[in-house]
Image (cartoon, rainbow, N blue to C red):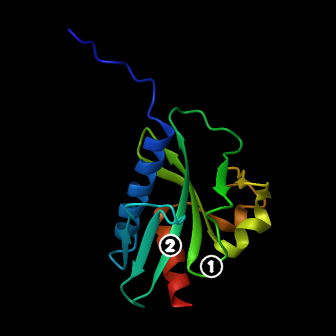
Amino acid sequence: MMTRPEYARPTSGQLGTAAEIMIACQLMLASQGRLSSYVPLVDDDGIDVMVHDKVTRRSLGLQVKSWTFLSEDRPRTVQFDVGLNTWRNDASLFLLAVAMDGLAAQMETAWLMPSGAVKTVANVGSKKMSLTPNPRHTSQDRYAQYRLASMGAVASALAAAFDR
């Protein structure tokens, strides 16, 4: 008789995919239906979620990076790595980095950045850019101007980007 293996925690791939799908669904709800979200079958172009605005009929891409807390502990910083080979400066591309509460399956903190702003706050290496924001809502680090406290705030910021 085979025994079922015990799993200590989800893999990083599972956590990332779960975050992308949760964000796509929550954006539609938080925008009261204004935004439609689509998850590409393949994300080799650096786009994890496509967002379509029903008002302006325009679309933009989100590269989603996530950090998932699987306990009550919260570090002083979280780290998001963005590969330079898939990143580009494009007015229709945004980075959405999210700190997720994996126990409650909810976003705790998000950072929404236009693609052109990412290199201004990231630590740029030869193959990747690293962002290390503090997830506390009171932090005044260099990422604070991009920090959002709810999916409603993310949806409003994206709607404002479409309205510009």
Residue 90 — which label? 1
Q: Position of residue 24 (x, y in %)?
A: 40, 63
Q: Position of residue 65 (x, y in %)?
A: 56, 55
Q: CA distance from mark 1 to mark 2?
A: 10 Å
109, above or below 35, in the image: above
| Residue 136 appears in view | no
Q: Quadrant of residue 137?
A: bottom right
Residue at 67% of width from left, 38% of height from top? 75
3, above or below 121, in the image: above
Give the residue pinned by disc 2.
Answer: 61
Residue at 48% of width from left, 81% of height from top? 159
The three-letter amino acid code for the residue at tag 2 is: Gly
Residue most toward the top?
A: 1
Seen from the viewer's position, the closer of residues 72 and 64 is 64
Q: Quadrant of residue 7?
A: top left
Neighbours of disc 2 within 10 Å: few (<14), some (14-19), many (20+): many
Residue at 54% of width from left, 75% of height from top? 157
> Which quadrant is home to the C terminus?
bottom right
